[in-house]
Amino acid sequence: MTDDPLSNPIRELSWRRKLSSADQARLRAWLADHPDAQLDWNSETALTKVLEQMPEFPVASNFTARVLQNVEREETREAKRASRSGWGWLWHRRWLPRLALAVVVLSAGFFAYERAVVEPRMMKEQDLRVRIARAQSLAEMPSVASVPDVDSLKDFDAIYALDPTPVADEQLVLLFK
Amino acid sequence: MAGLVFGKLDMMSFEPDPDAALMLLVKQGDHTAFAQLVDKYKQPVMNLVCRMLRDATEAEDLAQTVFVQVHKSAHRYQVSSKFSTWLFTIARNLSLNEIRRRSRHPTDSMDQPHPEQADQPQHQYEDTRTFGPTEMLLQGELENKIEEALSELPENQRTAILLCRQDELSYEDIAKVLDCSLSATKSLIHRGRETLKQKLKPYLRTGVWKQPK
């Protein structure tokens, strides 16, 4: 593209519409000053006309009717999709038996899992808790029942050998009488 | 209803775009308004898609998809943006997706009827062009050359040039569809046109294009 400030805007105008008489006069004056651009301008004009005359592709006579038919089909599909997004679709005759079966299968699976895995694990944990409690109580025993010092027990045997039953002082009893 | 919509648009200080008003009605579920938009834009969408895919049957299916997509996305349409810009952006994106899909699965064809579309009526075309035998020959040759030259352009240059033919799209609108700047858009059009001028040079000189339609 030439950088001429006059020809470029006119050129761009000519791509879109027929030039006004004022534009044509400006162009003629510009071409008079730039005769070497005349050939290029001629082919420019010719190309614009060629592009204008390009044939239109045939459109089917029922084109609009088919578009509307497709739109209606699309709307119906959308409406179905929207109704499925709510809970209403669950009660559809086609889906209810499948849903019931799915609920039964899932419930059975859940209970089987409970019995096979969860219950034994809970019993095991209960047993472990009891064992831990016992171990903890045994560990606490020495601190509860304190044993006397060994030195205080050195006369234990002698004391143990004494007659535990106290003997009555018969002479004192007589004196009292 | 349409008056109310136009009033709302005026209050929002937008130019009263009749397509935007129709789109507001489409948002409210008005199928007649949607049919009006389809009728107005089916030809330019078909032209664009056909020249991007280079397959009339596939193009028709894709053009249908474009309008279904427009209806599906109507709730996302912002009145502040021009309807035609939004429409052609969807058309371009879907065409690019189809081109990518084709390149991944070259043997797949959209010609095979989808099971869900089995009840749809067959395509019905009508040819409105009338040429004499000689005119038809010359015109046909030139048309083939143009289509060939266009198809050889890079996608963004081709789309820019094709959108440039749409009167209702400004350069800014074309830039939005192509997701690039205004200067980049003009540059794409210029480069594309330069390539076309080179390829069609003999035809442009002889003036075959001056043949009456």
Image: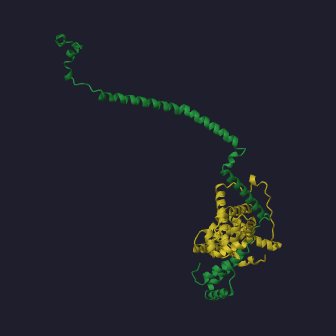
Chain colours: A green, B yellow
Instruction: Name the quadrant of the N terminus of chain B.
Output: bottom right
Closer-to-camera residue (A51/A150): A150
Specify whether residue B154 is in view: no
Residue A132 at x, y percent in the picture: 40, 30
Residue B208 at x, y percent in the picture: 75, 76
Residue A23 at x, y percent in the picture: 65, 86
Closer-to-camera residue (B2/B145): B2
In the image, residue A155 sits, relative to residue A80, either above or below, namely above
In the image, residue A28 sits, relative to residue B3, either above or below, namely below
**At 61% across and 88% down in the image, what residue appears?**
A33
**At 24% across and 24% down in the image, what residue appears?**
A148
Q: Quadrant of residue B95?
A: bottom right
Q: Quadrant of residue B80?
A: bottom right
Instruction: Name the quadrant of the C terminus of chain B.
Output: bottom right
Residue B107 at x, y percent in the picture: 69, 54
Specify whether residue A136 is in view: yes
Which residue, as the protein is rendered here, is positioned at the far front? A177
Closer-to-camera residue (B33/B38): B33
